[in-house]
Amino acid sequence: MLNSRNKIWKENKTIKKQSKEYFTRFPNEYIQGNIKTKFGVSRKFYITYILIDKYRSYEDYSWITIRKVLDFYGYKTTSRKPKAFKEILDVLEYMINNQMIEVKQDLDSLSYDTGIEIKIIPKNFDSTEKFAKLTSSQFDTIMMADSSLNKENILVAFLYINSYIGCRPRQDNGSEYENAKDNPEAFYRSISNMANELSMSKDTINQCIEYLTESSDDTPALLIKREVGSVQPDKSKPPQNVPNIYVLNKEGYKQEIEWALSKMLELYKVDEFYPSKSGNYRFENKK
């Protein structure tokens, strides 16, 4: 995986240096749960939403094609249209019906390469709070995944984790609030809960996290993982592992981990975590 990833990264290194970093504010309500169950729309919503925002103009117009969306999945665009083609049309129709966008063209008349002119309705499309920020460099790293069939899973897993990491509010002068340590920008929910909410297997999620936390000489990991350990509330029973901590790979991540560890000690009402079966990390609460 890393060899292929390094190759793609090096080929695009010059282009990425010249391009301007941008980000998409992805609404948490569409990622914290099963989107099909909650909204009756397929997971094609994720990449469609991201691409509409990516090609957005200052006047809130965007132009995409069905082929552009399908390219994310690696579908071959033959004369016989794949099921995904109809799913993308359904996503666009959902956005239209919920007044997120306007499209004057007849959706049934669209071909692979028809330029779809989209008028974004900011008040319904944009999230001003409770959103996960996806930067262009993060998206590019996800696009480097070896298997095109896994890109959607990796994207969904990252958006989900990022949505719970959150972003602390800041004071008017730009500095962080004094209670920053009480709101660590970290994810420490269980993988079982994540699998249940997203209707994905734990094995699939663990594979996605493995990709998101791996790095190479040229490609930094998107997430930093810190194993926490276990607790043993009942000494007559074996210790139970607690969730690991994940933080964004950015400046200050070590402090976020320490704050998250302290927060978890409070949540589990313990003074220390014991080593887990798969690791030996130990953190003691020093009073």
Image (spheres, rainbow, N blue to C red):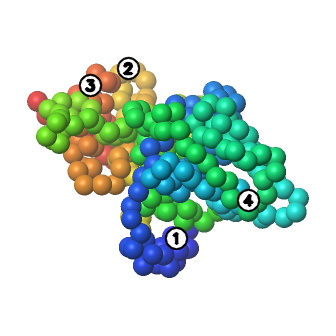
Q: Is residue 186 left or right of residue 31?
A: left
Q: Which mark is residue 163?
A: none
Q: CA distance from mark 4 to mark 1?
A: 31 Å
Instruction: Give the label, 1 or 3, closer to the camera.
Output: 1
The residue sitting at 63% across, 41% down in the picture is 102
Upstream in sequence: badge 1 or badge 2:
1
Q: Residues within 10 Å of mark 3 (few under 14, many from 20)?
A: few
Instruction: Give the label, 1 or 2, closer to the camera.
Output: 1
The residue sitting at 63% across, 37% down in the picture is 95
Do the CB atoms of the residues marked 3 and 2 lie less than 8 Å apart? no
Q: Amino acid at mark 3?
A: Glu
Do the CB atoms of the residues marked 1 and 3 lie less than 8 Å apart? no
Q: Is disc 1 placed on a helix, strand or loop?
A: helix
> Residue 188: x and y, percent?
39, 36
Question: In this view of the protein, can residue 229 be seen by the observer?
Answer: no
Q: Residues within 10 Å of mark 2 (few under 14, many from 20)?
A: few
Upstream in sequence: badge 3 or badge 2:
2
Q: Is disc 4 placed on a helix, strand or loop?
A: loop
The residue sitting at 49% across, 55% down in the picture is 57
Q: Which residue is mark 1?
A: 5
Q: CA distance from mark 4 to mark 2?
A: 63 Å
Q: Is residue 253 left or right of residue 119?
A: left
Q: Which residue is mark 4?
A: 114
> Residue 276: x and y, percent?
39, 41
Q: Which residue is mark 2?
A: 234
Upstream in sequence: badge 4 or badge 1:
1
